[in-house]
Every structure is written in structure tokens, then in C-alpha cells.
Image (cartoon, coloured by chain):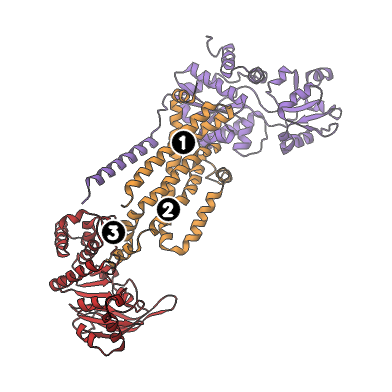
Amino acid sequence: MEPHTADGAAIEFRDVSYLLPAGQQILSHLNLQVLRGETLILLGRSGSGKTTTLKLVNRLLSPSSGEVCVNGFSIKNGDVIRLRRGLGYVIQDVGLFPHFNVERNIALVPRLEGWPEERVQGRVRELLELVGLEEHIASRYPHQLSGGQRQRVGVARALAADPAILLMDEPFGALDPLTRDELQREFLALQRRLSKTVVFVTHDLREALRLGSRIALLEAGRVVTVLSPPEFLRSQNPLAAAYARAFANGPNSAAY
Amino acid sequence: MRTLRHHRFRAVLAVIVIVLALLSSCSVSRVHRIVIGSKNFTESLILAEIMAQQIEAHSHLEVERRFYLAGTYICQQAILAGRIDIYPEYTGTALTAILKQKAVGSEAAVYQEVKSEYERRWQLTLGPGFGFNDTFAMEIRGEDARRLHIKTLSQAAVYAPQWRAGFGYEFMERPDGFRGLAAAYGLRFAGPPRVMDLGLLARALRDHQIDIAAGNTTDGLIPALDLFVLEDDRHYFPPYEAVPVVREQTLQSHPEVGRALAALAGKISDKEMQQLNYAVDGQHRDVKQVVHDFLRSKGSIDGN
Amino acid sequence: MNFVQFILQNRAQVLDLTLEHLWLVGVSTVLAALVGIPLGITIAHHPRFNKPVLAAANIIQTIPSLALFGFLLPVPWLGDRADRLAILALTLYALLPMIRNTYTGIRGVDVAVLEAGRGMGLSDRQLLLQVEMPLAMSVILSGVRVAVVISVGLATIAAAIGAGGLGELIFRGLAMVSNQLILAGAIPAALLALLADLGLGWVERRLRPQ
């Protein structure tokens, strides 16, 4: 099939709308491009459609109209399993398999992909090191880990099969501020090393400014504007400006 | 990486499952064991005990007794499933209750029908009859029978309008009970029959509260109370010949069982069965002892 | 002679009857699991069916067991052999715990875990076999345990219709007014139920996710 997007767009949303079965419109003629190698933040308040947008990429949800393209191809009719195996997915609650230890959690997808056992084990060690966990954590079970450790494992698991694209839905939202700060720093270091394409959902402007290469501001199911962090802070767009003001008024006013 | 604990747990689980599977598939050796069943009334018990002692005396087989099974259906199920090998049945009961056919025909015809059906359907064999019929008996006082010189129901029908009758609940209710009998013999009694408990009928008869009662031909109280059984000359009541029912497989594996049972053929008359019943029910003697004495008197087993 | 001596004297018979009892319970439990667990999984994944299915299983449960044995008797093929009939009836009674516990166990799996699994590219089957079932296993087993204990008790009633088992000793004992016989049937049956409860409870605890 002929690719029909511009070179460099890892993900493209074309005129995408999404309606709930009950009829509410969550996304409305959304158009957006995610460039290869960038960290695109989806920023917005609750109900703005950012998580829905993310889930359209790995087809946990399907658009009511419009098209979603990954790596140039429409994902509508392809093999959804293969699509998802090629995407890393990290969610706020992490969702580690409680009956698997850390090693089995991380190694799940590589094993499903049929990697030779040696390669799998090497990869697990590599990833633990990458996310800053000691090797002995590999035999622990999720309930024995702290919140921060769990999310690190979540990230390691998402990276296990070395996907080019990473989807992250408020991954650090449930962590305490110190741990969140730590993980944000490590995320930046990881990005510098790996240069993945990342779509990152958050409603925290500071996180967006810190981690993103571009910020897509969503409101009521539409993309209001897409700006780089410095542009965002200078923006005249009323919503962007409102956001900036809300966060500038101190950490408490921007509390969750 | 599976832990050792995990492996050991799985091993224990596997062992338990295997043991259970083995246990449930094997059964204790039945090679030299015969199981005899009986229904839960005295006559059935006596017949089963007779067969048991007979087989014990004439073979090296161990006999297990599973007596007091609740009824015909239970016994049938048990023998079909191979849980028992032998039990005493009545041809009439087999024909109506198990084969679900109408009970018509002579004693020999009914026997043949049951025997061939049992063999065809279920590989069960009917042994030769024990020698008596346990069917419905219309009883009158012995003194009346002698005084009026009557032996059959047709003869008695003449006197019926002067008599009061007493029957059990079932005999009154069943279409092949009183209603059919009255029609077959043109019986009319002085007033409607009294309905009472089976156990009280014989005494009521003796005490002149009733003049004719419906009981069983092998009732122990018949000789004891000098009652007389009127002959069913119009053959209204179906034959209920007492016979052993045996699994064919049992006979093939242990031909000595067949021989032992054959030796009992025709050995028990109606009167003898009445006496055996009375010994257990009326005199409260132990079944095993009663049977032992009976078989000895017949020369079937050696005395000791 | 007390019932212990009776059992010892008639070991062969009691063992035979115990094995018959185990056979009735074992076959019906396996059948109920083969039907009930997949059914439970189905209604867990498609909740609009859960009310009718659970209601149907519930209704079966309310039928007095002796009555169920009784009105299955005239059914052709089934009524011909008491053990077939008993196994069917016991299977029906074991369905509710199987279905309900499977449903509860699968619904109890953390939604985040399912979402992460699906997002990672696990197929429905892989999700079911590698994630949902292992996590629900302890609850499912608890349903099996309840089913087995119920069956051991109900199987004693099956003797009333000629299916054999330890209940036969109880019924014969009642007819003969013999306490030894009654106890020789009742005590082993109770022990079987107890052993099943303890044994399966142990396995359940081992399988519970920490």
C-alpha cells in the first residue's frame, strides 16, 4: 500500500471524530501530526479528549470517522496485534501482571514474539539498567515494589520489544512529587539515549514544558494549538495563556 | 524463572490427581465375590438369604449381602450397574413394573416373556422359579371354607352378598385391584369394603369383623390364623412367580452359582414360604437361623 | 458392634460404595467445570448475558434434589440408568458455584492489568489464558470446592433412586432401623466432604495471587 503521509510523520490523525455509544462527542474533526523522534505532549483538562486520542493510536478505541495513520499506513484494517506489539504503552496505574515477577512482566512481549531465551534475558538486564533498577529486582513481585519502582518496570516493559513509538498516559500521575521529579529526569535521559517517538498525555503544564518537544493543547475534542514549550509560554492564544497563568500562580493553584 | 517452590507444588498436585484417578478407576477385586441384593420386605430377605447360604455352601465364593434395597427400581438399577449380581424378583413385577407391559397370560408364558426380554435387553438371566407364587390372595376363615365346602373364588362369589370385605388402601385404589376383581367375578358384598392397614386385616378376619380379606398368598399369618386362600380360578390375578435374577456375566465367570441356584428350583411351596415368613415376622426369629434350618431340612446343606 | 467395627468387618463393601460415591462426585464435578467455567468466562466478557445465566443456575439450585431426581426418572435414556441420572442432576447442582465464581473471579481482575495487557498486544486468547485465568484461579477453585462439597452431600441422596454410593448404607440402615449401617454411610460421606474441603482449600490458598 502506498504511504500517503508526509515524510517524518510517525503518527497522523486526519479529521478524526469519536463519539461515545451514548452519543456524546469526545473528539471532533481532530487533525494532528506526531513527528518522528519527537516527544509530543497532549495537554488538556479532564474530558478534553487527550486519553481518547492516545487510545486511537493503538486501537484500544476506533474512530467514528476519519483516519489514523501510523508510519504512513492507515491502521484501520491491519492486524491490531502486530500494531500493538510495535507500540510501547504505559498507563498511570501501570497494570503490571501481579502473578508475574518483574522479569516475566518485562519479558512477556519478547517471549510472545519468539525471541530466543538468551536474547530475552539479556534484554531484561539491559532494560533494568536503563530504567535505573538493580538486577535483583528481577525476581521480585509487583506487590513488593514501591510506586516508583513499579512505574519504572512499566516503562521497561513497554520498551522491551524496542518499539519505535511509545504511548504514555499520565504515567507519573500517581506518584509522589519527589519520585515524579526523579522519573521525569530519567525520562529525559532515556529520550536522549533512545530518541523514541513519544506521545505523552498529561494535564500538568510543568511536566509538559519539561518533557515535551511540542505541546498539543486539546480542548473539547479539538486541537487548539500545537507549540514548542517556549512558544507556549509566549502564546497569545487565550487558552494557552490561561494555562500558563494557572501554572504561574504557584504550585498550589495548579494542584490536581 | 520458575521457583523451586512452584515446581514442587505442581508435582504434589500432579501426584494427588493421579492417585484420585487411579482410585476411582480401580475397584476392589470382585474376582471371588458375589453380591446378593434384596428388597426391603421379609420375603425378599428370606429368599436372598436362602440364595446366599446356598451359594456359600456349594462354592468357595465369598458372598456379600446388600439387603434392604428400597424397591424394585433400586434393585434393577443395582444389577444393571453390576453393583449386585443376584436378587430375588417376581415375574409379574418384572413384567409390569420393569418391562412396563400388561400382565396377562399363564404363569409359564409370563416367565418366558420376562426371561427372553431380560436376556435380550440387559444380559440378565432368570433362574428357575423357587416354586411359589406371591400374588394377591383372597382369604377367608378356614372354618368357613370347610363349612361351606368352597375352594374357589367363583364358588365364594355366591356367598359374597352376605359377607363384609376388608382391603388395604392400595388394593382399593388400583384398577387391577378390587375394581377389576369385582368385575371378573361379579362380586357384590354386603355394603362397601372396609379399608384398613394391611397388618390389621388378618386379625380382623379372625375376629369376625370382616369375612373376606385381600392379602398375599405367602402371608405368614395364613397358616398361623387358620386362614384359607380361595383359588383364583378365573386367573384374574397375574402370576408373581418368585425367581432369581442373575447377571449373565456372573454365571459365565462362576458356573457354580448357576448350579447352586438350579438346586433350589421348585424347592419352596406356597405353604413353606408362608411358614418361613411367619417364623421371621410372627415369631421374630433370626433370618439367618430360620434359613439355615430350612435349607438343612431340605438337605441342601449339611447340618452343623 | 459399633459402626467402626461394622466398617472394618465390611471393608470391601464400604470401599466399593465409597468408590461409587467418588465416581458420581468426580464425573459430575468435571462435567460441571467443563460447562460452567467457559460459561462463566463468557458472561464475564459479555455482561449483558449474566443476569439470565446466573438466574437460570440459581433456579436449578432451588429445586429440591430428591424432586429433581424424581422427575428426571421418566426421561428416556437418562432414566434407564440411575447413575446417569444422578450424574446429570449432580452436574446441574454444581453449575451455579462454578459459573458464579468464574464470573466473579474474572470480573475481579484489575482493569488496569487488562488494559495494559491489551495495549501491549496480547490477543484475547493470550489475555484469557495468561492473565485472566491465572489471576481468577483462586476464586474459581473456591467455586469448585463448594461444588464438590455440595455434590458429596447430594450424592448420598442419589442412593434413593438407585445410584449407589454411601447413601445406600444410610437408606438400608433406615429400612432396617440399624444405626451402625446409617453411620457407616454417613460418617465416611462426611469425611469425604471434609477432606475435599480441606484439600481444595489448601490448593486454593497456594494459588492466591499475593
Q: Which residue is mark 2?
A: C101
Q: How many other residues sit within 10 Å of disc 1, few (<14), some (14-19) or many (≥20)? A: some
Q: Are marks 2 and 3 on the same chain?
A: no
Residue depicted at 31% across the width and 88% down the height: A238
Residue under mark 1: which chain is it in?
A: C
Q: Nearer the viewer, residue C119 or B54?
A: C119
Q: Which residue is mark 3?
A: A97
The Cα atoms of the two marked residues, 2 and 3, are separated by 21 Å
Q: Is residue B47 above or below residue B98?
A: above
Q: Quadrant of residue A204?
A: bottom left
Q: Nearer the viewer, residue C132 or B87?
A: C132
Q: Which residue is mark 1?
A: C190
Give the residue type that dot 3 points to.
Phe
The hue used for chain A is red
Residue under mark 3: which chain is it in?
A: A
Q: Which chain is orange?
A: C
